[in-house]
Structures are given as C-alpha cells and as structure tokens.
Image (cartoon, rainbow, N blue to C red):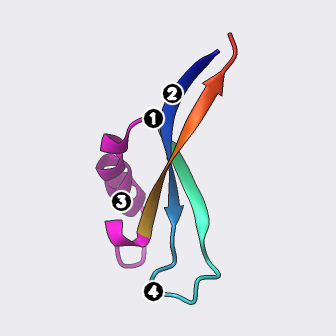
Amino acid sequence: MKSQQVFIVMYNDRYGNGDQKKIEVVLKDEKDFKKWLKNHNYDRDAEPETKEEFDLIPVNLLTFD
C-alpha cells in the first residue's frame, strides 16, 4: 500500500449563497493550483475567478499495488 497526499480543489461559492459549492479537480501537488487556475480561467466567458473562490483540501490517496 502506498499513500500520497493530493489536493481537492473545491469551489467555495464565497460570493454566492453557498449552494454552488462543488469539487473542481484533484491536484497531485499544491504548487499546481496557480497553473490550474490560469488554465481554468482561460476558456471562461465570464469574469476570471480568483484563488479566494477556491479551497484546497488535502487528502491522502491510497493505492494498492
């Protein structure tokens, strides 16, 4: 069994009423968040989202080889 920490990126609906929270992606490294956010905003027709609109939740990924 192997364990690795990964990060769930959750939209936190900071500027709404909280009913639009959703999991966006799982990242292998916290450092990848900035790259992901830039890519996420690239194709948006609306105003770009900021880092404050997302929560990074660390979780352990277990694999059984």
The answer to whether marks 2 and 1 mark residues whose Cβ atoms lie closer than 8 Å is yes
Q: Could you tell which of marks 1 and 4 lies nearer the N-terminus? A: 4
Give me the disc on residue 4: 2
Choose mark 2 or mark 3, whichever is in front. Answer: 2
Q: How far apart are labels 2 and 3 at the CA level?
A: 29 Å
Choose mark 4 or mark 2, whichever is in front. Answer: 2
Q: How far apart are labels 2 and 1 at the CA level?
A: 8 Å
Give me the disc on residue 42: 3
The answer to whether marks 2 and 3 mark residues whose Cβ atoms lie closer than 8 Å is no
Give me the disc on residue 28: 1
Between 57 and 13, the one lying in front of the other is 57
Mark 2: amino acid: Gln
* Residue beneath the point at 60% across and 72% down: 21
Mark 4: amino acid: Tyr
Between 37 and 19, the one lying in front of the other is 19
Mark 1: amino acid: Lys
Q: Is residue 45 left or right of residue 21?
A: left
Mark 4, secondary structure of its residue: loop
The answer to whether marks 1 and 4 mark residues whose Cβ atoms lie closer than 8 Å is no
Residue 56: x %, y % from top left: 44, 55
Q: Over which residues does the magenta segment extend?
A: 28-53
**Picture quarter with the N terminus:** top right
